Amino acid sequence: MPSADIELEVESLRSQLEAWNYQYYVLDTPSVPDAEYDRLMRRLQELEQQYPELVRPDSPTQRVGGEPQSEFSQVTHEVPMLSLDNAFDGAELRDFDRRVRERLGNPEAEVEYACEPKLDGIAVSLLYRDGVLERGATRGDGYSGEDITHNVRTIPSIPLRLQGEHIPGVLEVRGEIYMPRSGFESLNQRAREAGEKTFVNPRNAAAGSLRQLDARVTAQRPLEMCCYSVGQVERGELPVTHTQVLDRLLQWGLRTNPESAVVVGAEACEAYYEALAVKRDQLPYDIDGIVFKVNDLALQQRLGFVSRAPRWAIARKFPAQEEMTRLLDVEFQVGRTGAITPVARLEPVFVGGVTVSNATLHNSDEIQRLGVQVGDTVIVRRAGDVIPQVVSVVSERRPDDARPVAFPDRCPVCDSPVEREEGEAVVRCMGGLVCAAQQKAAIKHFASRRAMDIEGLGDKLVEQLVDEGLVENVAGLYTLTREQLQGLERMGEKSADNLLAALEVSKQTSLARFIFALGIREVGEATALNLARHFGNWETLAAAGDEQLLAVDDVGPVVADHLRQFFDSASSMQVVEQLRRAGVNWPDLEVAPPEQLPLAGQIWVVTGKLEAMGRNEAKQLLQDLGAKVAGSVSSRTSCVVAGPGAGSKLGKATELGVEVLDESAFLQRLAALGIEL
Ligand code: IVH
C-alpha cells in the first residue's frame, strides 16, 4: 500500500509534468530544460512501477508524444505556395482559356496547356541542397508551413539524394503526398480489426500520417509523393516549359504523374477532362479534378497572379466523392459464410458520379465507432469502385426521434441463433446451409463468371430456385429438369433449354475454378489457383494435412483451418461427390516441383502498357513459370518488363542496374522458355 505521502508526490509529479507538457507541446514554449523534465518523468515511472495500483491511463507516463502539432517547427516558404482557382463546368474552363488568350494579347492564337490529374492529398515542399534532401514542409497557409522532414524521409518515393546532371544548387520541389486507395483500404481494414478508429478518407489518412511525431508510425503508412512543380531555384537553370521541368524532375529521380499530357486549346482540355473522368475510378488514387497549366513558363510569368492563385492555371473539378444525406434505416444482410452485415438505407444522394441509396456499415463495431443512429445525417463516401461507405455522422443534426441501431440476436432470414467468434468483428448466422440466405449466396457464388461461369443463372433466378425449394445446394443445380424450370415465373421453354445447356457446358471446368466455386471461407481466386497448381488433383488436395496445406503460397493457418474444416465435413464432401457424379470434371495438372520451374527464385516487376497481353496476363505467366511478381523495384528484383508509359519503376530499375526488357524482348525470352503467344 502506498502511503499518503507517496500518493501526494505522484499527484504533484503528474500535475507538474502535465503543465510542462502543455507548454512544450501545445504552446510550443518549453519552460524547463529537458533534463529536468526527464528526471521528474523517471521518478514518476519508478513510483508507478513500485505501486501499480497508482497507474492511471491518463498519467503522463502512459502517453507517447503529446499534443502532436505543436512540436513541428515552422518553415517559411521563400516562394509562396499558392492555391488554384476552380472551374466547375466546361463553360468556366472556356472562360479561363479566353481570359488567358486575351491577356496574352492574341485572342485568336490557341494556347498550349499541360494537363495533370489533381491529386487529393497534402501539398508539400521538398528542399534539396546540392542534390541532398534537406527539408520537407507542409503547405500550411501558403507562406509558412510545418517542418515534416523526419516524416517525408520515410516515404520511399522521395529520394534522399537526387541523381543525374545539372541539378540546381538549391531546388525546391513541390507536389502532393497522398495515400493510394488500396493502402487506405488495408490501413482501415487493419484498424477495424484492431478495433481502432478508421480514417474518413485517403486524404485524411495521409494528413494524419504526416502529422506524426514518431516517424516510425509514418514509415508504416503507405504514402506516396507525386511532384507537380518547383518553387525556389538557385544556382542552376531549368528548361522553358512546365512539362520539360517535370521531365527533368523525373530524370533526377522524383515522381511525376504519368497521366500528364500536353494539349492545345480549351476544347482539347475538356476532352482530356472527359477522358480522365472515365478513368477516374480505375486510378489507384483519389483525384478531385484536373489541373490545366499554361505550358510555356515565359507566358506563365507574363500572366502572373491574382491574390493567391495564378492566372495561368485552373482546376476543373470532378463531382464530389463525399456528400451528406440521411440514414433512413439499417437492414441486415446475410452473406455466403453467414456473416451478417448491416447495410445503411439512405435517402438517395448523388455522390462519386452515381446515385447512392445503400452503403455498408461493415459490422456492429463500426456502428458503435460511428455512433450512428437511424435518422442521423451522415457523410457518405463513394470513391472508385469501392462500395459506398458511411464515414461519419454530423452529430449536430441528430433529430429528436433518432433511434439507436439494434443488432439482431437471431438470423433475420432463418431465425437461427447468431454468434460472434472470439476476436472477430463479424457476427454470423449459425444456420449454415439451412439458412436460405446462405444457400442463395453460395449458389450465386458457384454460378458466377469467375467460378463455374453458368451463363444465364443470375441472382434473381437463384433466389427463385431456392425460394421455390427446387435447389438447396450447388449440386442441386445439375439435377434441375426442363419441367421444373418451365414452371418458374418468366421462364420460357427457350430460356429453360438455354440454362440447361449452360449447366452442361459448365461441367467442363478447371480444378482452380472448382475449388474457388466451392466458396470455402477465405479461399479466393488466387488461393484456389495456388492450391490447384500445388496439388494438381482433387484427391491429393482433399487428403492434404496441415503441413502440406501450409506449404502452399498464400495459405496461412487460418486458410488451412477453413480448408480442413471443409474437407472434414461429411455434408460438404457429399456435395462434391454429387457434383462429380453429375459430370463436373476438370483435367488434372502436372505438378512440377516449384523449385524446378524455369524462373524459380526470381522476382519480376511488370510496368507500363503491354500490347500482346494485359499486365495481369503477363504476371500470371511469370508466376506460372515460377517467378514471384512484385509491385515495386528493389535491389532484389531480377528483371523488369517495361511497356510504354512505364514511370518511376523503370527509373528505379535503371538506377539500380536491374535488367529491363521491353515487350518484344520479353516475348523473346518467353519463346526461349517454350512459350509462344
Ligand atoms: S499546382 C500555383 N498541380 O491543389 C499552382 N496543384 O488547389 C499551385 N494539387 O495546394 C498548385 N494536384 O495541393 C498543382 N497537379 C497539380 C496538383 C495540385 C493537386 C493541389 C495542391 C494545391 C491545390 C490547389
Image: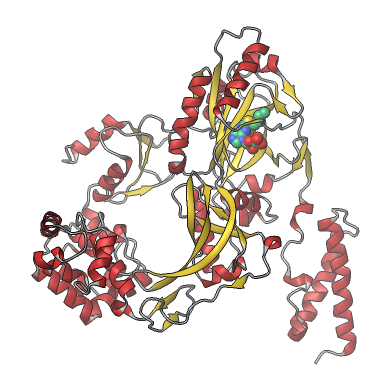
Across and down, in percent, residue 406 comes to 54, 76
Is residue 507 in view from this perspective? yes
Task: Answer with the quarter of the image where residue 402 lies.
Answer: bottom right
Which quadrant contains ligand 1? top right
- Judging depth in this view, the residue of 477 and 216 nearest the camera is 477
Across and down, in percent, residue 243 comes to 54, 22
Q: Quadrant of the N terminus?
A: bottom right
Task: Answer with the quarter of the image where residue 427 lies.
Answer: bottom left
The answer to whether 482 appears left or right of 423 in the picture is left
- Which residue is painted at 68% across and 25% down in the image? 169
- Which residue is painted at 24% across and 62% down in the image? 461
- Which residue is painted at 29% across and 68% down in the image? 440
Q: Residue furthest bottom?
A: 1
30 relative to 480, above or below: above
The answer to whether 429 appears left or right of 15 in the picture is left
Is residue 130 in view from this perspective? no
Across and down, in percent, residue 316 comes to 58, 31
